[in-house]
Image (cartoon, rainbow, N blue to C red):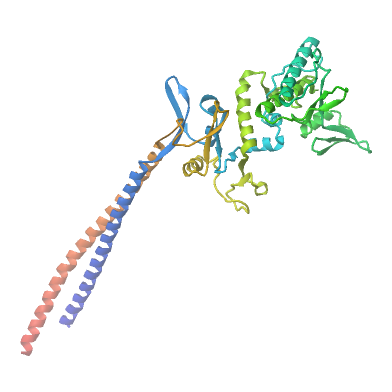
């Protein structure tokens, strides 16, 4: 029985030794994997140290150049246009990427620049006089001469000659016609019809009809009327655009804007004259020099859209079409779901880098937008991305600390296994010695 018990004990110790060695080998493999992870984390960190970002010149503070991280709003904004260069962003086909505000203004303007400007709160008119009792006849006559001269310049480019009229008075040759009307139907109800035929019903008993229409989008805006001139037979004829050049178009639109500003007058609730049905304070016109750069900025965008087309992004699937791309993070049925470069700076920069979005800047010499790239443009520079590097350093420190803690635990496990292995080996040797002696004694007895 003693010999059998010793042999059983020896087998038990052998099994425990084997298990100890297998566990030790597994822990050693874990330490090796930690070493591999350490190398991987180090490699990622080293790569992150090379992270760069695009910045763009926004102006100077004395001799010091100021750069900011590139973004759509910064790159295409009015401030950039006034301090550095005016940029537009296009797709690979040249269509201009615009904000929803500009897209809506263009869509509602139906190709009329004055209307486009008004939707954005501006007018290119520098006319400060209106055909009201608030101004003297001398002021109005001077304004009338200015209008005549503006139209004469346009007419000269399209071959129209109104004769040798001296432009002595302001109402003899031009008038402004609105194409909207408030009518009374057969039931005695007031209705308003705009130039597109849209009808707004005016509730019975409304005393401030104009105020009601203003509150419901029913007062005509810039471009809702037209200038007419009196022909040689004394008949009023509308002035339609007949030119073919940019110069001619600019002259036409300017003459239209000052004619409307002078002849199309309305009064607000305080009986104060205001322009274009929105209130004088709502329109920033060219009579204030501070507005000139903004008007030029929008004119360049308008002309670019006219020549190249436009597109923007929407979160509303129903609005998705060739000009409105779907970007909602939800489940859309049209278009690809992706981040909006108008709002997400990383997406915008990535699109510039991979070429899916491109840059053009306005050349005052060529009077047109010219293509450029992030590598060629002298206002764009690539610099170390300190924020990305800082994030990488934080991650590296945390990851390494985590690995060190795991490595310490594995070292303690190995030390424990080594101690256990030594104890088992000692016990194994002692039991084996007893078994050997028992076997030797048994052979002597039976021999």
Q: Residue at x 25, y 64 (%)?
A: 25
Left or right of 134 in this view: 321: left
The residue closer to the viewer here, 141 or 278, is 141
The residue closer to the viewer here, 247 or 363, is 247
Q: Residue 419: image x %, image y %?
A: 20, 61
The image shows residue 146, relative to residue 406, as above or below, that is above
Q: Is residue 267 visible in this depiction of the protein?
A: no
Q: Which residue is drawn at 43% across and 25% down?
A: 65
When asked about the image quadrant of residue 109, the answer is: top right
The image shows residue 149, relative to residue 395, as above or below, that is above
Left or right of 370 in this view: 61: left
Q: Residue at x 41, y 40 (%)?
A: 388
When asked about the image quadrant of residue 160, the answer is: top right
Q: Residue 48: image x %, image y %?
A: 37, 43
Give the quarter of the figure containing the C terminus: bottom left
When asked about the image quadrant of residue 364, the answer is: top right
The residue closer to the viewer here, 59 or 403, is 59
Give the quarter of the figure containing the N terminus: bottom left
Q: Residue at x 63, y 22 (%)?
A: 291
Q: Residue 444: image x %, image y %?
A: 5, 86
Q: Is residue 367 visible in this depiction of the protein?
A: yes
Q: Residue 446: image x %, image y %?
A: 7, 90
* Number of on-image labels: 0
Residue most extreme to the front: 159
């Amino acid at each position: 029985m003693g010999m059998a018990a010793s042999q059983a004990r020896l087998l038990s110790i052998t099994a425990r030794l084997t298990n100890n060695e297998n566990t030790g080998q597994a822990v050693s493999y874990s330490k090796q994997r930690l070493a591999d992870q350490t190398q991987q984390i180090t490699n990622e960190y080293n790569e992150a140290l090379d992270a760069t970002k695009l910045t763009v010149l926004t102006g100077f503070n004395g001799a010091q150049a100021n750069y900011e991280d590139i973004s759509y709003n910064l790159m295409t904004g009015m401030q950039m246009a006034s301090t550095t260069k005016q940029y537009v962003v296009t797709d690979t086909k040249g269509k201009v990427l615009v904000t929803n505000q500009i897209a809506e203004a263009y869509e509602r303007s139906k190709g009329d620049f004055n209307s486009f400007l008004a939707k954005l709160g501006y007018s290119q008119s520098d006319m400060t006089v209106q055909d009201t009792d608030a101004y003297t006849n001398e002021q109005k006559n001077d304004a009338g001469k200015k209008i005549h001269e503006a139209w004469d310049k346009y007419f000269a480019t399209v071959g129209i000659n109104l004769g040798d009229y001296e432009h002595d008075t302001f109402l003899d040759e031009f008038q402004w016609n609105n194409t909207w009307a408030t009518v009374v139907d057969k039931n005695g109800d007031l209705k308003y019809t705009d130039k597109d035929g849209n009808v707004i019903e005016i509730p019975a008993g409304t005393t401030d009809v104009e105020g009601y229409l203003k509150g419901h989008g029913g007062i005509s805006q810039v471009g809702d009327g037209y200038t007419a001139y009196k022909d040689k037979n004394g008949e009023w004829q509308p002035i339609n655009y007949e030119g073919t050049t940019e110069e001619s178009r600019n002259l036409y639109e300017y003459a239209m804007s000052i004619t409307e500003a002078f002849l199309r007058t309305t009064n607000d609730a305080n009986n104060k004259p205001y322009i274009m049905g929105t209130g004088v304070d709502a329109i920033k016109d060219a009579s204030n020099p501070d507005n000139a750069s903004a008007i030029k900025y929008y004119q360049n965008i308008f002309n670019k859209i006219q020549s190249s087309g436009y597109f923007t992004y929407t979160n509303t699937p129903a609005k998705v079409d060739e000009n409105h791309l779907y970007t909602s993070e939800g489940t859309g049925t049209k278009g690809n779901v992706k981040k909006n470069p108008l709002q997400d700076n990383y997406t915008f920069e990535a699109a510039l880098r991979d070429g899916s979005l491109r840059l053009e800047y306005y050349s005052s010499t060529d009077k047109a937008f010219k293509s450029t790239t992030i590598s060629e443009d002298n206002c764009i520079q690539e610099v170390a991305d300190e924020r990305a590097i800082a994030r990488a350093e934080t991650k590296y420190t945390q990851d390494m600390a985590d690995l060190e803690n795991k490595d310490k635990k594995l070292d303690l496990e190995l030390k424990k296994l080594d101690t256990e292995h030594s104890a088992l080996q000692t016990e194994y040797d002692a039991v084996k010695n007893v078994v050997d002696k028992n076997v030797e004694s048994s052979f002597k007895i039976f021999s």
